[in-house]
Amino acid sequence: MTHISREYAEALFALAQESGRPAEFETALDLTEETLKENPDFLKLLSSPAVSREDRTNALSSVLGGKIPLSVEMLLRMMVHRGHAKEIREMIVCYRELDRDSRRESVAKVVSAAALTEEQQSALAEKLEKRFGRKMILDCQVDPSLIGGIRVEAEGTVLDGTLRSRLREIKDVMNSGAPRPERSAALSNSRFSSSRTGSR
């Protein structure tokens, strides 16, 4: 995440708090993100140096004007005018992080071999909330290649309980070339017994 996108996000978040309408700002950013995602050519236009600044900012207002709070529209126009249109998506991500942090919420990315049931998700969220001391919102994804178990990323921490991870750890140990204590001891005892038998 760039420093530029964070500065815009902090400015917009401050405006949302001052206005007392944070929900409206969040809805506006959802609409903006959806519009850019569904119309990639629109973002190209907003970012194109071949198009005048006035035409770019007017294009933004023609699409989003009247649908989002004026404060949000003006900040987006500023980003486009300054040539920072490509930072809009990152700004939205950063804004949401600031919003969640203000409410002591975090997103936990959960990857499992099979889809988790609602009961499993609730139980996992409860455990994560106890561990990290804040409300956790689960972003669940399915990856059949994991074979079994789940992998969780939250608050900069990775909790990997997948079978693939365990198999990888075993493989690393086997490839390390380090002697296995149990096997070494067994071989040593075997040699010792043989030498005693031969001496008799």
Image (tube, rainbow, N blue to C red):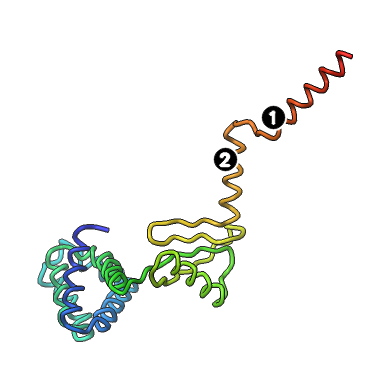
Of the 4 image quadrants, the one containing the C terminus is top right
Viewport quadrant of the N terminus: bottom left
Image depth: mark 2 or mark 1 in front:
1
Residue 198 is situated, as x and y percent measured from the top left of the image, at 86, 15
Q: Position of residue 64 (x, y in %)?
A: 22, 80
Residue drawn at 61 percent across, 48 percent down: 167
Location of residue 30 in the rendering, given as x and y in whole percent from the top left corner:
31, 77
Residue 63, by quadrant, is bottom left
**Residue 41 in sight:** no
Amino acid type of disc 1? Ser
Instruction: Give the class, few, some or many, for how many residues have Cα within 10 Å of label 1's Cα (few <14, many ≥20).
Output: few
Using residue 91 as the reference point, say whether residue 196 is left or right of it. right
Q: Is residue 63 left or right of residue 145?
A: left
Vertical arrangement, residue 169 with respect to residue 126, above or below: above
State the residue in front, 192 or 142.
Answer: 192
- In the rendered image, which residue does mark 2 sit on? 172
Residue beneath label 1, please?
184
From the viewer's perspective, is 54 left or right of 177? Answer: left
Q: Residue at x 46, y 67 (%)?
A: 128
Whichever of callouts 2 and 1 sits on the residue coming sooner in the sequence is: 2
Q: Quadrant of residue 145?
A: bottom right
The answer, for residue 66, to whether it is visible in the render is yes
Mark 2–mark 1 CB contact (< 8 Å): no
Label 2: few (<14), some (14–19) or many (≥20) C-alpha neighbours in 10 Å: few
Question: Which residue is rendered at x = 18% and y = 75% of the image?
Answer: 59
Q: Nearer the viewer, residue 21 or 33?
A: 21
Q: Amino acid at mark 2?
A: Asp
Q: What percent of the width, then of the height, locates residue 166?
A: 59, 50
Q: SS at mark 2?
A: helix
Residue at the limit of the structure toward the top, as seen here: 199
